[in-house]
Amino acid sequence: MRQALLTAIGFLYGLVLAFFGLGVAGGGHGVMIPLYIFGSPFFFPLLFLAPVVLWTIAGFLLSRAQRRLYRLALFCLLGLHYLGIAPYLVLLGDWEYLDRAWERAPINLMILFACYFMGQIALWVALAQVIINPRRAERCA
């Protein structure tokens, strides 16, 4: 039950990020930076599906994080995600479009990135709970 729930939460998180990221991308005529960030490092092979796939996998790995192998896989996935953001921003960052989007409606970008950061905080808090108190996490499974 817990595995399905956390996987579904990861899927929904990725879906929300992809949906609103596509909104600010404007069909390629807007800012792509949020999608680069949300789907890193899988943006190029998966494009707009990258956030959905990435965060579904993260939710699944989190649901199994009591086991060392899954926890290690989650750390590697998150490390690749965070490290993968830099090349996208340096090589592909469409900063001109970001400035335009910020001038038109800064609240849209603030809400979008707030959702991303709240999800990141929730993920790390849940992972810390598994690491600090693994017996409780096993009982919840």
Image: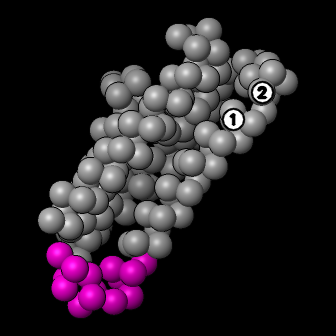
Residue 132 among those drawn in magenta: yes
Label 2 packing within 10 angstroms: few (<14), some (14-19), many (20+) = few
Q: Is residue 61 visible?
A: no
Tell me the kind of residue under disc 1: Leu
Left or right of 14? Residue 104 is right
Residue nearest the observer in this picture, 92 or 133: 133
Res. 127 image quadrant: bottom left
**Quadrant assignment, res 4:** bottom left
Residue 81 versus residue 20: which sits nearer the camera?
20
Quadrant of the snapshot with the C terminus? bottom left
Q: Classify residue 10 as left or right of residue 80.
A: left
Under circle 2, the secondary element is: loop
Tag shown at residue 105: 2
Q: Is residue 80 above or below residue 62?
A: above
State if disc 2 and disc 1 touch (CB < 8 Å).
yes
Q: Which residue is mark 1?
A: 109
State the residue at coordinates (31%, 44%): 11
* Residue 113 shows up from this direction: yes
Label 1 crowding class (10 Å Cα cut-off): few <14, some 14-19, many 20+? some
Q: What's the magenta region?
A: 128-141
Assign the magenta stretch its main secondary structure. helix
Q: Label 2 sits on what residue type?
A: Ala
Please give left or right for residue 41 compared with residue 25 in the image. Answer: left
Residue 126 located left or right of residue 57: right
The N terminus - image quarter: bottom left
Q: Secondary structure at mark 1?
A: helix
Percent from the top left, x then y, of residue 42?
Answer: 38, 34
Above or below residue 60? Residue 36 is above
